[in-house]
Amino acid sequence: MTKNKYILNWIDEMAAMTRPDRIVWIDGSDEQRDALRAEACSTGEMIKLNQELLPGCYLHRTAINDVARVEGRTFICTRTKEDAGNINNWIEPGECYARLSKLFTGSMKGRTMYVIPYSMGIVGSDFAKYGIELTDSIYVVLNMLIMTRVGNDVLDAIGDSADYIKGLHSKAQLDESNRYIVHFPEDNTIWSVNSGYGGNVLLGKKCFALRIASFLGRKEKWMAEHMLILGVEFPNGETKYVCAAFPSACGKTNLAMLIPPEIYRKKGYKVWTVGDDIAWLRIGKDGRLWAMNPENGFFGVAPGTNEKSNPNALATTKSGAIFTNVCHNLDNNTVWWEGLDNNPPKNAVNWKGEPWDYRKYDKADKINTSGAHPNSRFTAVATNCPCLSKEFNNPAGVPISAIIFGGRRAKTAPLVYQSTSWQNGTFVGSIMASETTAAAAGAIGVVRRDPMAMRPFVGYNMGDYWQHWLDMGKIIPHAPKIFHVNWFRTDDEGNFIWPGFGDNLRVLDWILARCEDRVDAVETPIGFVPKPEDINIEGLDITVDTVRGLLSVDRQSWLDDISNIRDFYALVGDRVPAELHKELNQLEARLKA
Ligand code: GTP
Ligand code: SPV
Ligand code: MN
């Protein structure tokens, strides 16, 4: 435990409000974890899966109304509304504390309050940041034990300092209408109530490592981004690293763990995973931008994960994993989800906990007819991953050659293009758009602007965030090049044209060649695109003409997008940097020329 009076006083205060029957400190030991697993199984909170096939693996089902992040119930409570900006929901902090205190009062009666000291990053390293999450959920404890570095050494590292993020979570009654995910960045505080789902309650993840961290990064001149980090090892043994920001459920985990196509494997290419969701970036002594993954596990989308699309992710889930809202195969006490294989279990329970008839599956009504929820997830231990980078535990992280933005765009965005400068690249990030997915509550498949894949995760004013990107560009001596990709262009029947997944390495290969000036490119109004013949399609059943089509820039659809971008900039408001307005005007002029 600890003698730190800031921590002890705060816990006393929170316990006086929530009134748990007992308080248990999480020490990170296997014994305590095993006891909590057993307790959760005895109450039905977790289901122990077939330990021969899936050792250490468990299944959990959340409430039916609690299956994704709730952006409409997520708030940034800075003292002034302007500092939170128009993209974030805001409540005046005093009012918000008062409102939530009512919901927390007595919410842990009859329950245990768990105290989870955790680190984002390697405990004791220069760039680690610490948090303590108080929660009444064993599910949260068991997930935090996988996703972050937990234990007494964190308390030692905090010492007697007040410098840690205070997180309070209670499932309370899981009341949807009183669900709140609230951040007080000026107080280093996060309060989450009435949810038991992933990003709403694993407070180290989106709440701390993105929303609070982005706020801290602006003050301290670094960046917290919704990015995967991967290394491409070339046949000569050299490894180059890239970061990629795609919105939720748009392919970060898949890209981070990709298996090179056979022709690349034969030549000796390898891909190494450093992170699949969050990157903390700072300027290294060598003037390059370095990225580290503050997490210790993967909270990945289950549906669609299979032996062909992502064998590395699948291997990672074979032991010590927690599955949330997937389908339960009662014949062998294992799990299943849509897209795992073509053998849906005949004797099964769906994500809602009801008997499930796979023959009634209807693609148009997945929520009600699928075995697994479209946003069902696995929580998996990073060190299980066969392609985990040897730099995973390097506190300094890895040097970044390229930053890649991307989203789901059926038409407008080409397969890949390169920005012309850091400023132009920041602009490219600011105008990102993507079709919405099941990762957040709400309509699916609607195009919305999602700058830097951070729309739900910037802990302050979006305009200030863009200014921070521009400011960073001025102080990074050897900045990465910035690109944009789109794996999701569709043909007239709605089929994806680009094969995607492992074959995305073909695009990374071009990107890294550009970073070293090994290949030239074609200038278009939006930036540089590859010459079609420079995308290696050996071994694919598509033609150069298909690639040409994927790379085409349709001026009219881009011009149609301009007014939507202007509306979005107007919504972000008067803190949009002048440089970005200028970039937008220049883009429009080039498209009209
Ligand atoms: P979060 O964990 O929500 O941040 O998601 P993520 O960005 O890590 O997305 P993930 O890699 O889990 O991919 C989500 C879904 O996107 C998968 O189930 C796939 O169906 C699909 N996907 C990923 N990569 C590709 C690709 O290259 N092409 C196509 N067509 N689909 C892809
Ligand atoms: C995302 O939605 O981007 C996720 C899942 O990575 S959650 O942790 O729920 O935010
Ligand atoms: Mn994510």
Image: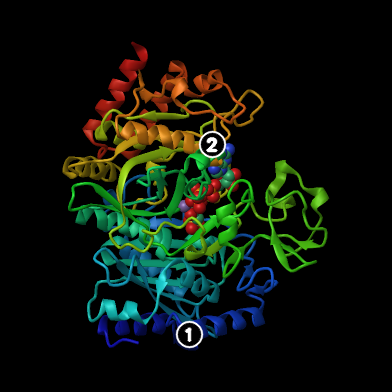
Q: Are marks 1 and 2 in contact (CB under 8 Å)?
A: no
Determine whether 574 is above or below 355 in the image.
above
Amino acid type, label 1: Pro
The image shows residue 481 at horizontal and vertical percentages of 30, 36
The quadrant where residue 528 appears? top left
Residue depicted at x 45% and y 86%: 24
Quadrant that contains the C terminus: top left
Reply above or below: 7 against 425.
below
Would residue 320 be found to the left or right of residue 246 on screen? right
Total number of numbered discs in the rendering: 2
Helix, strand or loop for disc 2: helix
Q: Is residue 10 visible?
A: no
Amino acid at circle 2: Ile
Residue at x-position 39% and y-position 59%: 390
Report helix, strand or loop for mark 1.
Answer: loop
Distance in Å between CA atoms under marks 1 and 2: 59 Å
Choose between 582 and 58: the one closer to the eye: 58
Name the one closer to the observer, 13 or 369: 369
Task: Point out the frontmost of discs 1 and 2.
Answer: 2
Q: Which residue is mark 1?
A: 20
Residue ID for mark 2: 263
Q: Residues within 10 Å of mark 1 (few under 14, many from 20)?
A: some
Up/down of 290 relative to 193, above or below: above
Would you identify the image quadrant in which residue 582 lies? top left
| Location of residue 154 in the rendering, given as x and y in whole percent from the top left corner | 33, 77
- Along the polypeptide, which appears first: circle 1 or circle 2? 1
